[in-house]
Image: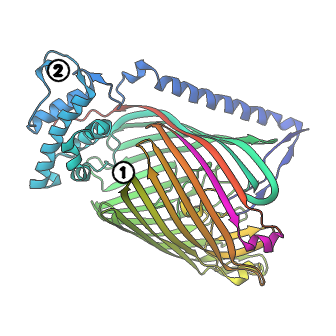
C-alpha cells in the first residue's frame, strides 16, 4: 500500500476531510492525476510562449506598439471615426496616404480630437445620438491608449465626462482571447494550521500554493459567447501535498441579436454579486463555481434582473453538495448609485439532511457623492436547519449585514483611500452551548474582505477547540496610499466581538491587523507581499488555556497573460 495525502481540511460546511490509505490497485488513478498535472502545466507554458510570440502579437492584440502604421487596427479605426465625426484634426497625410509611422503618443492625441467631438454631440443630443458600435470602438481605443491620453491636459479636464460616456460595454470588445491567469504564493504561519486555518499554539508551518487557470474565450458574434477555463490548484509543504485539476468554468451565453433584453448563460460558471458579502468566488483560494443556468433580463437600461440556479461543482466545492437558486435585481440610478434586491435558496452542505435549506433575503444600496462612497446591505435568513441534538429540522431566524464608508483624497501629493465598516451577524446562546444554531447568521459562499486576509475568522462565528462563539460584530478601519501608479501600501485593522459565548467566557475574540504592499509590474503582472497579525482576545485564553497570537505572511505573484483579437466593427 502507499500513502496518498488528502490533507485534513475544513470545507465550507465545517466538515473535516481526513487523509486515507490508497490500495495498490488504485495507484493508476494517482498516476493519472500526475499526468493531468503535467498536461496542465504544459498547456500553461504553451499559452505563455504563444502569448509572448511576436507572430501571435501581429494577429491583432489590443496592445498598441510604440510606432504604428495605417495597417494597424488602431490607426484604421481612429481615421474612420475622425472622418465620421468631423474631428478638428485628422491623421496626417504622411500616415494615411504615404504609409509612414506614427507614435503611440501622437495617436492618442488624434483619438482625443475624436472623443471631444463625441462628448459635445452627447451633451447636445444625448448619448443615444452616437451609434453604440462607435462608442464600443472608442472605449476599446480609450482603454488601449489611456496612459498616453492622461498626458494631455484636455483629457484630464474632461476625464469624468469622457469616462461616463464610455462606460465599459457588457459585450466583449474582442473576437477571441486566450491566456492563463492565477497566482503563485509562498506563505507561512505561526500558532496556525494553514490547511484548515485553525488556531494551533506552538505550531508553525510554511507551504507553496498555486492556482493556474488556462482559458479561451470566443465571441464569434455579438449574440454568442463561449468560455472555457481549466484550473489547477494545490499546495505542498512540510510533508503535506494537495492537488486538484479540473474544468473550472465552461459555458455558452446567448442573447437576442441586436438587443440586451434577454441573455441566457448555460454551463459551469461563477456567481458573484455585489461586494460578495453573500455570493462570491473564494478568489484567494481555489474558487467556487456552479453547474448552472442564468437568465438575465434587461427591460430598460437601468434595470437588470438575474434568475439563476445550479449545483455546486466538484472538485472545488470543498465537499459541499447541493444546489443554489434565486434571483438578483439591480436598478442603477447613476455611476456608483444603485439599489439591489435578492433572494437565494441554498441547500449546500457536507452532510445534508432531508428538508434542509437556507433562504437569504437582502437589500444592497450604494451611493457616491464626490470622493465619498457609502454601501449598506441588510440581510435576513429563513429556512430549515437540522438539529442533531433532537433529530429534527428547526426554523431558521437569523439576520446580519454591513455598512461601509470610504473616502478618496490627496494628501502630501499622494492618493489616499480611507475605509470604515461595521458588520453584524446574529447569534444565540443556544448556538454557543451546542443546543441549536437556527438563529446564527451564516454566509458560507461569501468572499468578503470584511473577515480579513487570514481566514482565522471566516464567518459570523468563531471556533477554538470545542468551544464556539455565536454571532459576531466586526469593526474595520483601513487606509491605503498610492506612492506611485505601480506601488500601493495598505493597512487594515479588524476587531471581532462575539454576541454570545458560553457562561464565564469573554466576548473579546481578537484584533486582526493586515499590512499589504502591492507592486504592479504591468497590467498583467503584480507582486503582493503581506504580513498579518491576529492579537488573540480573552476568548482564546478561556477556550484553550493559552493566548498566543497568530502570525501569517505571504509573497504572491498574480498574473494574467493573454492575447486577443479585437472585434472588427462594421462601418455605419
The magenta stretch is 527-545
The residue at the far right in this view is 1
Q: Considering depth in this image, is 144 or 528 the residue closer to the camera?
A: 528
The residue under the point 22% across, 27% down is 75
> Can the viewer see residue 243?
no
407 shown above or below 90:
below
* Pick the front one: 418 or 58: 418
Q: Secondary structure at mark 2?
A: helix
- Residue sitting at 27 percent across and 28 percent down? 104
Relative to 58, residue 547 above or below? below
Residue density around tag 2, few if under 14, some if 14–19, many if 20 or more, within 10 Å: some
Q: Quadrant of the C terminus?
A: top left
Q: Residue 316, how many percent across, how many down?
A: 64, 49
Q: Is residue 452 left or right of residue 391?
A: left
Q: Which residue is mark 2?
A: 95
Quadrant housing residue 136: top left
Q: Position of residue 38 (x, y in %)?
A: 67, 29
Q: Which residue is mark 1?
A: 413
| Residue 98 on the magenta segment | no
At 21% from the left edge and 46% from the top edge, which residue is drawn?
A: 132
For the residues labelled 1 and 2, the Cα–Cα distance comes to 40 Å
Comes first in the chain, label 1 or label 2: 2
Q: Which of the image's four quarters has the N terminus?
A: top right
Residue 541 counted in the magenta span: yes
CA neighbours of label 1 inside 10 A, class few (<14), some (14 to 19), many (20+): few
Disc number placed over residue 356 in the picture, else none: none
Of labels 1 and 2, the one closer to you: 1
Amino acid at each position: 500500500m502507499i500513502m496518498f495525502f488528502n490533507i485534513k481540511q475544513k470545507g465550507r460546511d465545517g466538515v473535516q476531510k481526513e487523509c486515507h490509505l490508497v490500495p495498490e490497485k488504485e495507484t493508476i488513478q494517482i498516476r493519472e492525476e500526475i499526468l493531468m498535472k503535467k498536461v496542465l502545466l504544459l498547456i500553461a507554458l504553451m499559452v505563455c510562449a504563444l502569448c509572448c510570440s511576436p507572430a501571435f502579437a501581429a494577429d491583432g492584440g489590443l496592445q498598441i506598439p510604440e510606432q504604428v502604421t495605417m495597417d494597424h487596427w488602431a490607426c484604421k479605426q481612429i481615421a474612420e471615426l475622425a472622418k465620421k465625426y468631423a474631428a478638428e484634426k485628422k491623421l496626417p497625410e504622411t500616415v494615411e496616404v504615404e504609409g509612414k509611422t506614427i507614435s503611440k503618443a501622437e495617436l492618442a492625441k488624434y483619438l482625443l480630437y475624436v472623443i471631444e467631438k463625441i462628448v459635445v454631440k452627447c451633451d447636445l443630443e444625448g448619448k443615444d445620438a452616437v451609434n453604440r458600435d462607435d462608442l464600443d470602438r472608442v472605449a476599446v481605443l480609450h482603454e488601449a491608449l489611456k496612459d498616453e491620453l492622461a498626458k494631455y491636459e484636455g483629457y484630464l479636464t474632461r476625464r469624468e465626462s469622457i469616462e461616463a460616456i464610455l462606460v465599459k460595454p457588457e459585450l466583449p470588445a474582442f473576437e477571441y482571447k486566450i491566456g492563463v491567469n492565477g497566482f503563485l504564493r509562498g506563505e507561512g504561519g505561526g500558532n496556525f494550521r494553514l490547511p484548515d486555518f485553525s488556531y494551533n499554539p506552538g505550531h508553525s508551518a510554511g507551504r507553496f500554493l498555486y492556482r493556474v487557470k488556462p482559458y479561451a474565450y470566443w465571441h464569434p458574434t455579438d449574440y454568442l459567447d463561449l468560455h472555457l477555463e481549466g484550473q489547477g490548484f494545490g499546495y505542498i509543504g512540510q510533508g503535506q501535498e494537495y492537488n486538484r485539476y479540473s474544468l473550472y468554468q465552461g459555458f455558452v451565453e446567448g442573447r437576442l441579436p441586436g438587443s440586451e433584453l434577454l441573455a441566457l448563460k448555460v454551463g459551469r460558471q461563477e456567481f458573484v454579486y455585489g461586494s460578495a458579502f453573500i455570493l462570491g468566488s473564494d478568489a484567494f483560494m481555489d474558487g467556487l463555481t456552479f453547474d448552472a443556468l442564468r437568465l438575465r433580463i434587461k427591460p430598460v437600461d437601468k434595470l437588470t434582473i438575474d434568475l439563476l440556479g445550479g449545483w455546486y461543482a466538484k472538485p472545488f466545492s470543498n465537499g459541499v453538495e447541493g444546489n443554489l437558486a434565486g434571483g438578483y435585481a439591480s436598478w442603477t440610478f447613476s455611476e456608483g448609485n444603485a439599489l439591489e434586491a435578492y433572494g437565494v435558496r441554498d441547500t449546500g452542505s457536507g452532510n445534508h439532511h432531508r428538508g434542509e435549506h437556507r433562504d437569504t433575503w437582502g437589500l444592497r444600496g450604494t451611493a457616491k457623492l464626490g470622493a465619498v462612497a457609502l454601501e449598506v446591505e441588510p440581510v435576513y435568513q429563513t429556512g430549515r436547519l437540522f438539529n442533531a441534538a433532537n433529530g429534527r429540522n428547526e426554523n431558521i431566524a437569523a439576520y446580519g449585514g454591513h455598512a461601509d464608508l470610504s473616502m478618496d483624497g490627496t494628501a502630501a501629493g499622494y492618493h489616499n483611500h480611507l475605509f470604515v465598516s461595521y458588520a453584524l451577524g446574529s447569534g444565540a446562546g443556544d448556538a454557543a452551548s451546542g443546543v441549536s444554531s437556527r438563529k446564527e447568521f451564516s454566509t458560507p459562499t461569501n468572499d468578503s474582505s470584511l473577515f480579513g486576509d487570514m481566514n482565522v475568522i471566516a464567518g459570523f462565528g468563531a471556533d477554538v477547540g470545542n468551544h464556539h462563539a455565536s454571532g459576531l460584530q466586526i469593526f474595520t478601519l483601513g487606509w491605503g496610499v498610492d506612492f506611485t501608479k505601480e506601488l500601493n501600501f495598505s493597512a487594515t485593522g479588524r476587531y471581532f466581538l462575539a454576541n454570545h459565548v458560553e457562561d464565564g467566557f469573554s466576548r473579546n475574540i481578537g484584533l486582526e491587523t493586515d499590512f499589504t504592499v502591492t507592486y504592479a509590474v504591468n497590467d498583467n503582472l503584480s507582486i503582493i507581499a503581506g504580513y498579518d497579525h491576529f492579537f488573540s482576545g480573552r476568548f482564546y485564553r478561556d477556550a484553550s488555556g493559552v493566548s498566543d497570537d497568530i502570525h501569517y505572511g505571504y509573497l504572491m505573484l498574480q498574473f494574467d497573460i493573454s492575447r486577443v483579437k479585437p472585434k472588427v466593427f462594421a462601418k455605419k
